[in-house]
Image: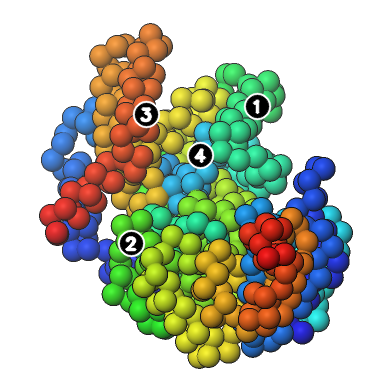
């Protein structure tokens, strides 16, 4: 128990400049809403934290596990709909719906992981993409999910913590920050755990991993299952933050790609990578949105993403974090 | 008998890579497996370690049948292996490489770290603990692979061409290292090698394979005189002369 707490909270093994950077980051996020008063600025910050949260979860399978998963939006959807529908039907408190969403997403991930991990590399990536799209279409097609019209969350007259509805974005800011921190601490535990090491061994070389007693297939399935559960948390947040969800909003292909991209740009397989990636891409995404207009943005945002993706793949597969690490190593020498 | 292979056959389509191989490896011995390129040595290793499923035949380890077991089960029961060529985990530090091996026997990180450092000490790579394997010279990478395999606490260590790509001095070093760890850990070694001198000095027992068959077996000096072995390596004319 004591060891678990230490593993969750300790960043002792990281170099000092990382701990310092992290501390500065925390302070900036904590004081942010008191300095930035504009609604737009605050909305960008909340979206950044949301995607950093998504990235942290995706990093488990995509970064540490090295399995490119292009279907994380389905898990976001499961979380969002679990919260949305349970609130709509039974008025279930938010904090009950979160674990339910996580369990549903994890269970679904576990179920599809078995056949999917018969595939490797690109084929696996395509399979994840297809599964996510199938779920999205099902959620459009079904009546009980509200179909394409989506789900509207009944608005509570007074701000309250049971349904996590507040009048001001400041509350949502600290609320998403709390979710983000819990997942960061979980990932901090994970990266030091036996499972974390096993995932990395599988990413580096499956034959070697197996020769060291690691069940490669089982490791992938477990990693994918946990990633599913983690993805649902952000979905639940989206429901109470936007108060309206539909399949096009919470489970589209763009979302899956953007989640994967933030991590790859920031640095897959490092604890800070998703945060760096989200800090870069989310403001960019919002800016492009504002600049190009909501009119589907003419696909220009996709072109820019594709360009970033190509540069990362060709030049720096370990993303921005890879560059930082390299520079630091050079300096030390 | 620690390891026993009975009438093992491995076919790939029409190609017979291992044809009716039977062999025994006694506990505490160093057994060498030699043979020209394409003799089927690596295929045999892969069958034993669970990477290939034998077409026919049986494999026993410590009296238990392990035929067709997946590699991670084979590792757990106490067979560790290294790979031909270099197969480190390139983006993980040396310490992490070895720790992942140690995790084979424990769930606790600190325990794994302790075990890893013990093995790294034994192989004199402790100073490189925080380096990435890809930044290190080949000889050290070989040691990392060896350390990682040893960290799984095997009873049998199978080495596939561990001396390939090393210069004579480095070869001598690894030879001494192997002898030392064998003594200290009470291991059984089963190794293939191209470098004849290496395997002949190290092994107490040598098996010779050629074209998928086992053609000779015995103490190194006897095997080296056997006409069939000379023929397999140098051609028929040398054997007669």
Crowd tier of the residue under label 3, counting other residues whose Cα lies within 10 Å: few below 14, some 14–19, many 20 or above: some
Q: Nearer the viewer, residue A319 or A43?
A: A319
* Residue A277 visible in the picture: no
Residue B195 versus residue A202 in the image, above or below: below
Kindly report which numbered mark, 1 or 4, lies closer to the viewer in this rendering: 4
Q: Residue at x 60, y 75 (%)?
A: B157
Give the total number of marks visible in the rendering. 4
Measure how far apart labels 4 and 2 are at the Cα level. 31 Å
**Residue at image point 41% right, 55% down:** B90
What subunit carries mark 4? A
Which label was assigned to residue B137? 2
Q: Which residue carries the number 4 mark? A: A68
Instruction: Please give the label number shown on residue A309.
Output: 3
Label 2 – label 3 distance at C-alpha? 33 Å
Question: What residue is disc 1 on?
Answer: A134
From the top left corner, tell me how far across and down residue A154 is, in percent.
51, 32
Label 2 – label 1 distance at C-alpha: 49 Å
Q: Which-is-in-front pick, marks 3 and 1?
A: 3
**Camera-side mark, 2 or 1:** 2
Task: Identify the secondary structure beneath mark 1.
Answer: helix
Q: Which of the marked residues, 3 or 1, is nearer the chain's N terminus?
A: 1
Image marks 3 and 1: residues in contact by CB distance under 8 Å: no
Q: Earlier in the sequence, mark 1 or mark 4?
A: 4
Tag 2–tag 1 contact (CB < 8 Å): no
Q: Position of residue A119 (x, y in %)?
A: 65, 39
Q: Are marks 2 and 3 on the same chain?
A: no
Identify the chain of the residue marked 3, using the numbered disc in the image: A
Q: Nearer the viewer, mark 4 or mark 2?
A: 2
Is A261 in front, or is A189?
A261
Find residue A223 and report its horizontal and vertical position in percent.
Answer: 56, 52
Given the image, what chain letter belongs to the residue carrying mark 1?
A
């Amino acid at each position: 128990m004591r060891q678990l707490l230490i593993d969750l909270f300790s960043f002792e093994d990281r170099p000092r400049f990382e701990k310092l950077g992290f501390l500065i980051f925390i302070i900036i996020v904590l004081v942010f809403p008191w300095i930035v008063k504009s609604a737009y600025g605050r909305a960008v910050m909340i979206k950044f934290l949301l995607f950093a949260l998504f990235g942290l979860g995706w990093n488990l399978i995509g970064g540490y596990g090295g399995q490119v998963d292009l279907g994380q939006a389905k898990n976001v959807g499961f979380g969002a709909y679990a919260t949305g529908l349970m609130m709509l039907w039974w008025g279930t408190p938010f904090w009950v719906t979160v674990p339910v969403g996580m369990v549903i997403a994890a269970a679904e991930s576990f179920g599809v992981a078995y056949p999917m991990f018969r595939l490797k590399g690109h084929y696996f990536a395509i399979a994840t993409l297809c599964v996510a799209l199938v779920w999205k279409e099902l959620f459009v097609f079904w009546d009980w999910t509200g179909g394409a019209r989506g789900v509207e969350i009944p608005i509570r007259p007074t701000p309250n913590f049971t349904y996590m509805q507040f009048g001001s974005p400041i509350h949502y800011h600290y609320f998403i920050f709390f979710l983000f921190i819990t997942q960061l601490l979980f990932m901090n535990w994970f990266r030091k755990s036996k499972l974390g090491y096993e995932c990395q061994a599988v990413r580096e070389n499956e034959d070697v991993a197996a020769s060291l007693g690691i069940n490669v297939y089982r490791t992938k399935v477990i990693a994918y299952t946990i990633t599913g559960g983690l993805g649902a948390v952000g979905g639940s947040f989206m429901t109470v933050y936007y108060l309206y969800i539909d399949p096009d909003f919470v489970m589209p292909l763009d979302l899956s790609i953007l989640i994967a991209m933030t991590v790859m740009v920031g640095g897959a397989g490092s604890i800070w990578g998703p945060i760096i990636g989200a800090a870069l891409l989310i403001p960019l995404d919002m800016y492009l949105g504002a600049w190009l207009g909501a009119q589907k943005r003419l696909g220009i945002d996709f072109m820019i993403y594709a360009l970033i993706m190509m540069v990362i793949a060709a030049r720096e597969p370990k993303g921005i974090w890879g560059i930082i690490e390299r520079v630091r190593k050079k300096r030390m020498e | 008998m620690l390891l026993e292979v009975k009438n093992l056959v491995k076919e790939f389509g029409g190609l017979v890579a291992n044809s009716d191989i039977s062999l025994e490896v006694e506990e505490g011995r160093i057994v060498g497996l030699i043979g020209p390129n394409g003799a089927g040595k690596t295929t045999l290793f892969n069958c034993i370690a669970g990477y290939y499923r034998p077409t026919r035949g049986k494999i026993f380890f410590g009296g238990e049948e392990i035929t067709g077991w997946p590699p991670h089960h084979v590792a757990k029961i106490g067979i560790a292996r290294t790979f031909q060529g270099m197969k480190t985990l390139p983006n993980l530090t040396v310490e992490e490489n070895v720790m992942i091996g140690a995790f084979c026997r424990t769930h606790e990180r600190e325990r794994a770290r302790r075990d890893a450092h013990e093995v790294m000490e034994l192989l004199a790579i402790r100073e490189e603990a925080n380096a990435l394997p890809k930044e290190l010279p080949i000889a050290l990478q070989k040691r990392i692979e060896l350390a990682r395999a040893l960290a799984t606490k095997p009873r049998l260590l199978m080495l596939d061409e561990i001396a390939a790509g090393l210069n004579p001095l480095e070869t001598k070093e690894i030879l001494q290292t192997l002898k030392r760890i064998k003594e200290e850990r009470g291991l059984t070694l089963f190794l293939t090698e191209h470098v004849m001198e290496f395997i002949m000095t190290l092994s107490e027992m040598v098996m010779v394979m050629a074209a998928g068959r086992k053609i000779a077996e015995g103490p190194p000096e006897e095997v080296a005189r056997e006409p069939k072995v000379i023929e397999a390596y140098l051609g028929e004319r040398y054997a007669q002369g």
